[in-house]
Image (cartoon, coloured by chain):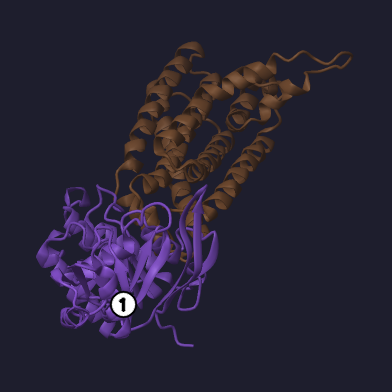
Chain colours: A purple, B brown
């Protein structure tokens, strides 16, 4: 099988002592797509990415790139590039010296160093020690390092941190282009907005477990509007709605009814039942709220 | 593998630690051998004895150089953990074991260079201060030089292994220096104070162990040649006992094997631990 850059996580779990960082996580990043890896800080994103890259050994399950575990890759830097943290630099080394070290390790000619420097827009800063770089410049240098081996897959951990809006836009279009070449991209973020315009798929993590995976469109579609009704007799209105085939009705703590339908239908039902309406609010969650609902702590005890 | 070696050489060349440690190597060498040369010239009056003093100064210098070679080995590895560059190093290398091998070979080369520098500077300064004393015979001189190079190489490798085991730069350096400069002396003192078993002749077993501790083993190997030159093969052991604070030392090459065994064990441990370590 031709190496493709496909990234697969198969029932990945990782425990650090008594702390479970990741539990039974499975997903696939298909070549030609950008997958957003979402979750709040501490939800296990970084641990998962590091398991994919062979830096952390899973307690159980397997992480594979091109169908192989990282340690089995004959030419790892050509298979996958990792942008894991903006701190992985010796402060005294210049950007060029840093890249030349890793170009030698990978076995690519030194001209490749100049190529990636130009690609990420650091050509003018190549002779400066990295110790004086801003966070955004370090992110660019980390990306340049990941690209040295011309990999088929990219794994990026919060690459937007420290980038200015211009840099974020540039990164977004770069990752889209990278995926359009038939390569795969897995990019983590704790903000949905950061991957909203980039990702074809998202994997949403909460407390180390997957709470959603699939397209963003499906996530949007899963969100149906609700109408919150304050009325004279919630029971009679509910009965009328049920006769009309509407069974998704909740009673809110404040006595209002929450109905999964539009306001017209609820108003008509109320008129038919002869129930006075005191107030009606249409509620629609945007994607960000949906994401928040997915990842928010659901409190204690069953509801 | 060749690529990884080149990468390690570029890492070494692009930071200052190798020459920052070369400076104390040269300073120590110059001061010790200047003193040795002066001592040899005054006490032995430029006779045959001055060459022995020169050899002994060289051996002592090489012993201290090996400590700096070890420090360099520790720094090479722990700076990767300190600056978190180990992540990228592992991402761009086909296997952690090869990274360890590349580091051992590179740091070993630097340690060997330190030994060579110590011999060249030490000999030059010693002879200059003596002002026309006899050059040691080529055999013993080569013997001390070769032993010094091997000992420094082994301690460099030990430093790499220790750095890989401990990963904390400060932790590894403190641990290594406290043991090498003081800990082993205390240990040897305790072992040497052991009472001989009732009815047995010769030194007690515990006291004999002193010669098989790593720092002592390196020192014995280094002092072997000068001690033979000074006291002859039969009494050289007594001289070494005095110089290294050990009991019943084996010959030089056996001591080298002892030190190599310690280093091999450290590398094996580093290989096992390093391969499994989570880089978080």
- Where is residue B277 shown, x and y percent of the image? 50, 52
Is residue B214 depicted above or below A197 in this figure?
above
Who is closer to the viewer here, B258 or A197? A197
Q: Secondary structure at mark 1?
A: helix
Q: Which residue is mark 1?
A: A239
Mark 1, Cα crowd under 10 Å, few <14 / some 14-19 / many 20+, is: some
Q: Is residue B258 left or right of residue A89?
A: right
Q: Residue at x 49, y 35 (%)?
A: B66
- Where is residue B141 shown, x and y percent of the image? 54, 35
Q: Is residue A107 left or right of residue A26?
A: left
Query: Which quarter of the picture shows residue A270?
Result: bottom left
Q: Residue at x 10, y 67 (%)?
A: A166
Disc 1 sits on a residue from what chain? A
Q: Can I make out residue A191 in this image?
A: yes
Who is closer to the viewer here, B5 or A263? A263
- Where is residue B92 shown, x and y percent of the image? 39, 64
Who is closer to the viewer here, A130 or A232? A232
């Amino acid at each position: 099988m031709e190496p493709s850059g496909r990234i697969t996580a198969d029932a990945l779990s990782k425990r650090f002592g008594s702390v479970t960082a990741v539990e039974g996580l499975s997903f696939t990043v298909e070549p030609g797509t950008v997958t957003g890896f979402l979750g709040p800080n501490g939800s296990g994103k970084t641990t998962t990415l590091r398991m994919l890259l062979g830096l952390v050994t899973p307690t159980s399950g397997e992480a594979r790139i091109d169908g192989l575990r990282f340690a089995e890759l004959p030419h790892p830097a050509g298979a996958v590039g990792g942008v894991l943290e903006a701190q992985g630099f010796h402060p005294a080394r210049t950007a060029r010296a840093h890249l030349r070290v890793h170009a030698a390790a990978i076995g690519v000619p030194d001209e490749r160093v100049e190529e990636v420097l130009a690609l990420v827009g650091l050509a003018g800063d190549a002779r400066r020690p990295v110790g004086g770089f801003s966070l955004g410049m370090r992110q660019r240098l980390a990306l340049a390092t990941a690209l040295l081996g011309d990999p088929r897959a990219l794994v990026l951990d919060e690459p937007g941190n420290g980038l200015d809006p211009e840099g974020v836009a540039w990164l977004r279009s770069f990752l889209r282009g990278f995926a359009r070449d038939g390569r795969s991209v897995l990019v983590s973020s704790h903000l949905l907005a950061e991957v909203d315009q980039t990702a074809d798929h998202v994997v949403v993590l909460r407390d180390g477990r997957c709470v959603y995976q699939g397209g963003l469109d499906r996530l949007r579609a899963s969100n149906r509007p609700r109408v919150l009704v304050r009325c004279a007799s919630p029971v009679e209105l509910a009965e009328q709605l049920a006769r009309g085939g509407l069974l998704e009705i909740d009673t809110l703590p404040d006595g209002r009814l929450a109905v999964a339908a539009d306001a017209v239908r609820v108003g008509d039902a109320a008129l038919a039942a002869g129930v006075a309406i005191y107030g009606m609010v249409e509620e629609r969650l945007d994607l960000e709220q949906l994401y928040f609902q997915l990842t928010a702590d659901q409190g204690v005890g069953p509801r | 593998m060749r690529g990884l070696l080149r990468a390690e050489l570029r890492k070494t060349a692009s930071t200052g630690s190798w020459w920052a440690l070369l400076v104390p190597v040269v300073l120590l060498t110059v001061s010790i051998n200047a003193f040795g040369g002066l001592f040899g010239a005054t006490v032995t009056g430029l006779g045959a004895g001055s060459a022995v003093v020169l050899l002994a100064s060289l051996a002592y210098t090489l012993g201290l150089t090996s400590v700096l070679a070890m420090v360099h080995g520790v720094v090479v590895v722990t700076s990767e953990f300190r600056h978190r560059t180990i992540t990228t190093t592992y991402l761009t290398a086909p296997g952690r074991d090869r990274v360890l091998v590349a580091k051992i070979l590179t740091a070993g080369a630097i340690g060997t260079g330190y030994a060579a520098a110590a011999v060249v500077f030490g000999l030059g300064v010693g002879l200059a201060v003596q002002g026309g004393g006899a050059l040691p015979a080529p055999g013993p001189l080569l013997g001390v030089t070769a032993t010094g190079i091997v000992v420094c190489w082994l301690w460099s490798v030990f430093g790499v292994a220790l750095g890989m085991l401990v990963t904390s730069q400060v932790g590894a350096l403190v641990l290594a220096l406290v043991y090498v400069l003081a800990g082993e002396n205390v240990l040897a003192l305790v072992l040497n104070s052991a009472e001989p078993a009732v009815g047995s002749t010769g030194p007690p077993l515990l006291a004999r162990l002193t010669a098989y501790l790593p720092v002592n083993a390196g020192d014995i190997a280094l002092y072997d040649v000068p001690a033979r030159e000074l006291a002859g093969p039969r009494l050289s052991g007594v001289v070494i006992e005095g110089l290294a604070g050990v009991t019943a030392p084996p010959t030089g090459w056996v001591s080298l094997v002892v030190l190599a065994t310690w280093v091999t064990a450290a590398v094996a441990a580093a290989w096992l631990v390093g391969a499994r370590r989570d880089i978080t």
